[in-house]
Image: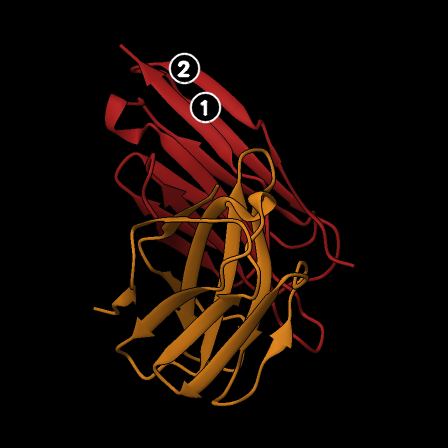
Chain colours: A red, B orange
Amino acid sequence: ELKVEQNPLFLSMQEGKNYTIYCNYSTTSDRLYWYRQDPGKSLESLFVLLSNGAVKQEGRLMASLDTKARLSTLHITAAVHDLSATYFCAVVNAGNNRKLIWGLGTSLAVNP
Amino acid sequence: DVKVTQSSRYLVKRTGEKVFLECVQDMDHENMFWYRQDPGLGLRLIYFSYDVKMKEKGDIPEGYSVSREKKERFSLILESASTNQTSMYLCASSLGPGGTEAFFGQGTRLTVV
């Protein structure tokens, strides 16, 4: 059974600092998503990573995928307050049902 | 842009009531999903549907049923609402046969009193 673990679950950081969120998954998958959720709002897709070594960047966020290590990272560069949100990774179950399996989310607070 | 619309943003219902949560998507997506989101538990899949009139149980289907009579609409039904069903409910849709990007509605915060 595919399991997805994110860490840390809570992250408080200062503006201007860099940090990385990790997403580990337990079995083979060919697709991984990162989503963002603002407080009280719904989820918005940030990145889809399809292959080993894939890297995607949008502004201060960069996501990468290592399928051999079954690890994705979401790197935050020079954080700003607007990045405060909960970030989820979701991994496609490569089995028959191809459901998305979700991590618990990382709640990020960027403080002045 | 894909739009997934949930019929209510906030709902308050009494214990024992039958509750309908409606979700409509406008991009001809095959797959539709209902999740509930609770603090510390992440997103948990209740039911999903990959075609009209087709449905499959997710991880926590107990106490819920669904209906998909038309491709664009997926309804979640709480047959007899209970207080432990107080939660945020999220509907999502995706295009392909599974594993493609999911687009979410704005969520319905349901309180059962």
Disc 1 packing (10 Å; few <14; some 14–19; many ≥20): some
Q: Residue at x 66, y 75 (%)?
A: A97
Q: Is residue A64 above or below residue A95?
A: above
Q: Position of residue A64 (x, y in %)?
A: 49, 46
Residue at which label 1 appears = A19
Q: Position of residue A84 (x, y in %)?
A: 33, 27
Q: Quadrant of residue B16?
A: bottom right
Q: Is residue B72 above or below residue B83?
A: below
> CB of mark 1 within 8 Å of CB of mark 2?
yes
Q: Residue at x 50, y 87 (%)?
A: B51
Q: Residue at x 57, y 43 (%)?
A: B83
Q: Position of residue A28 (x, y in %)?
A: 71, 61
Q: Is residue B72 above or below residue A1?
A: below
> Which chain does the residue under circle 2 lie in?
A
Q: Nearer the viewer, residue B61 or A104?
A: B61
Disc 2 packing (10 Å; few <14; some 14–19; many ≥20): some
Taking the image as shown, residue B9 lies to the left or right of residue B13, namely: left
Residue at which label 2 appears = A13
| Quadrant placement of the N terminus of chain A | bottom right
At numbered mark 2, what does the secondary structure look like: helix, strand or loop? strand
Q: Are marks 1 and 2 on the same chain?
A: yes
Q: Amino acid at mark 2?
A: Met
| Quadrant placement of the C terminus of chain A | top left
Q: Earlier in the sequence, mark 1 or mark 2?
A: 2
Q: Position of residue A78 (x, y in %)?
A: 31, 22
Q: CA gap, disc 1 to disc 2?
A: 8 Å
Taking the image as shown, residue A30 lies to the left or right of residue A17, namely: right
Q: Quadrant of residue A6?
A: top right
